[in-house]
Image (spheres, grey):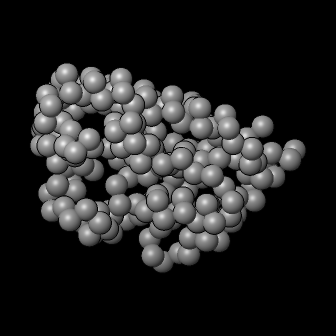
Amino acid sequence: MTLRIGLTGGIGSGKSTVAKVFETMGIPVYYADDAARRIMNEDEQVRQQIVAYFGPSAYKNNQLDRQYIGSQVFNNKEKLEFMNSLVHPATIKDAEQWMHKQTTPYAIKEAAIIFESGTQDQYDYIIGVSAPTPLRILRAMKRDGSSRDQVLARMNKQIQEVIKMRLCDFVIYNDEQQAIIPQVIKIHNALVLETQE
């Protein structure tokens, strides 16, 4: 049986970088954000509900108009909650189906909001990726072209890093001081060993 592993961390912690290292070791990774984007474009039911709620402007050239949706949900709790109530369950279901097909000793679901969405019980183990706040802010600004305030606003919506890391079974420090690969190998070996016992 394939172990279900959650991989999480705050914005700018470098979750995706860590996930890619696991992938080079032959471990399949499900990227929740990518899946959510795909679902919003391809799942007919989800599309219909988005259009019914946000209007025909929600899609442009048959693709979700992320800028338009972003402007709608930004600072509007009700609209954001609607979007989440639609996309999160669909993504969770999609991830479940994906997990069932995996045959490796363990498979990873990379998601920012494992604890925030209350789905932590679906995993055998959770790996956290930690990085100092100033570094996380810089990374997110660089990656998304966001302002410092925009990054901080997004950070404030997530559980505090310290608390989140305490809830994880393993923590990888992505602080540009410690090499990631040896940390990943150590966890990989522990998880493979777990499946052999």
Q: How many marks?
A: 0
Q: Is residue 127 above or below residue 146?
A: above
Residue 52 location in percent, x, y? 19, 22
Q: Is residue 75 above or below residue 128?
A: above
**Residue at x-position 43% and y-position 28%:** 90
Q: Is residue 147 above or below residue 81?
A: below
Image quadrant in which the C terminus is located: top right
* Residue 143 in view here: yes
**Residue at x-position 22% and y-position 56%:** 151
Image quadrant in which the N terminus is located: top right
**Residue at x-position 26% and y-position 41%:** 62
Front position in the image: 113 or 31: 31
Residue 133 location in percent, x, y? 32, 62
Q: Quadrant of residue 53?
A: top left
**Residue at x-position 58% and y-position 65%:** 21
Q: Quadrant of residue 86?
A: top left
- Residue farthest to the front? 61
Residue 88 location in percent, x, y? 39, 31
* Residue 183 in view here: no
Front position in the image: 132 or 65: 65
Residue 107 location in percent, x, y? 65, 47
- Residue farthest to the right? 197
In this rendering, would 78 be left or right of 89? left
Front position in the image: 44 or 134: 44
Q: Quadrant of residue 143?
A: bottom left
In this rendering, would 3 be left or right of 36? right
